[in-house]
Amino acid sequence: MNNNLTVLEINSAAVKHNLQYFKSKIQENTKILVVVKAFGYGSNAIEIAKIIQNDVAYFAVAYTHEGIALKNAKIKTPILVLHPQMTDLDCIIKYGLEPNLYSTRILKAFLTLADAQNLIDNSIHIEFNTGLNRLGFLENDIKNISSILKEKKTVKVNSIFSHLVASEDKNEREFSIKQIAKFENIANAFEKHLGFKPMMHITNTSGIINYSQAHFDMVRLGIGLYGFANDKKETSQLKNVMSLKSVISQIHQIEKGESIGYNRALIANNFMKTATIPIGHSDGIHRNLGKGKGFVTINNQKAFIVGNVCMDMTMIDITHIDCKEGDQVIIFNNQNTVEELAKISHTISYEVLTAISQRVKRIVK
Ligand SMILES: *Cc1c(COP(=O)(O)O)cnc(C)c1O
């Protein structure tokens, strides 16, 4: 039935399996936060949240509007907004989202708003920068921020967290261990100044795998839930969540000497058969997969991309494949993996998944 369009299939059993796999790696009293930013890594954040909402302690999104979408879908699990902007703070409060307050500027702005609205114990989170140099307070901000926060009845620091720089890279193990130690020192000092102990968390997917000593009160699972673990052995334990499928719109017989696609990027040396599929670079088929670098499969046979990938379409070489218009084309699935595609495009699985455009229909199975 879905054979006649481009669809991204989401396998809900695989999502559940992957969550269970990571749960088996953590202590029973360690909480799990699942990251559903960027439309659930390109899948469908709301559908993912619905599948696992009763099995996780938290969801996290990058931006406020992503959190609002989950709230509008009646997701009741607490939602941490990792990267709120100054202009969002009203909405954060209105929708009951929990902000990461990562700088003095945004912390003060939030506290001013919290005072004005007479909030009581509104949950907030504080991020510390232990080496990524992306967001967060530094160790020597502790005194200052704890004096700002001390005795505040309007807000409650629910957690403090940090983010690892290279949790997947075994060559950077020493650095990661230093980051973890730094985070523990910060947590201890913060607790002393503040007079109570917020939750602590630092590990992402690869951190969960490689630094079990640093799971602390909660772990933050992202890419692993979607079936990738930045590690062959670990990934082999996971189930593929997303499959991208398309269809043959039209077949062309190409005579020797004819060119195919924009800028005549391929000129046929011999007779060729090509198929046009309805998905292009604006949908996440990276243009550098063109000119024979990337491939799709039809009946388990590889069909390489010919010429330049177009915005909405891609042409593939089916000279030696027995197929017809309307047949299914697999761009990636459990066999044609996202990681292989990522390697050919010189990027990572994260980028391949999140690049799939919103006009591609998502189907939950
Ligand atoms: C995206 C993100 C994660 C998830 O990382 P994965 O490598 O996908 O598990 C965790 N924490 C923060 C702060 C993030 O931005």
Image (cartoon, grey):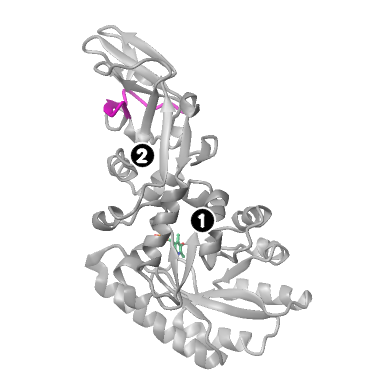
Give me the C-alpha separation between circle 2 and circle 1: 20 Å
What residue sits right under mark 1 in the picture? Answer: 36
- With 262 as the anchor, is 233 left or right in this view? left
The extreme top residue here reads: 255
User: Magenta span has 303?
Assistant: yes
**29 or 352, nearer to the observer:** 29
Q: Residue at x 33, y 57 (%)?
A: 229
Q: Residue at x 67, y 86 (%)?
A: 152
Q: Is residue 328 above or below residue 219?
A: above
Residue 340 has which mark? none
Q: Quadrant of residue 90?
A: bottom right
Residue 128, percent from left and from top: 47, 75
Tell me whether the residue at label 2 lies in contact with that at label 1, contact meaning CB atoms closer than 8 angstroms. no
Please state the extent of the stretch shown in magenta in the rendering.
Answer: 297-311
Q: Residues within 10 Å of mark 2 (few under 14, many from 20)?
A: some
Q: Is residue 38 above or below residue 170?
A: above
- With 106 as the anchor, is 344 left or right in this view? left
Say what amino acid the circle numbered 1 marks.
Answer: Val
What residue sits right under mark 2 in the picture? Answer: 333
* Helix, strand or loop status at disc 2: loop
- Between label 2 and label 1, give the one nearer the viewer: 2
**280 or 147, nearer to the observer:** 280
- With 316 as the anchor, is 233 left or right in this view? left
Q: Earlier in the sequence, mark 2 or mark 1?
A: 1
Can residue 240 be seen in this snapshot?
yes
* Helix, strand or loop status at disc 1: loop
Say what amino acid the circle numbered 2 marks.
Answer: Asn
Task: Look at the magenta stretch and give its main secondary structure.
Answer: loop
Q: Residue at x 33, y 8 (%)?
A: 253
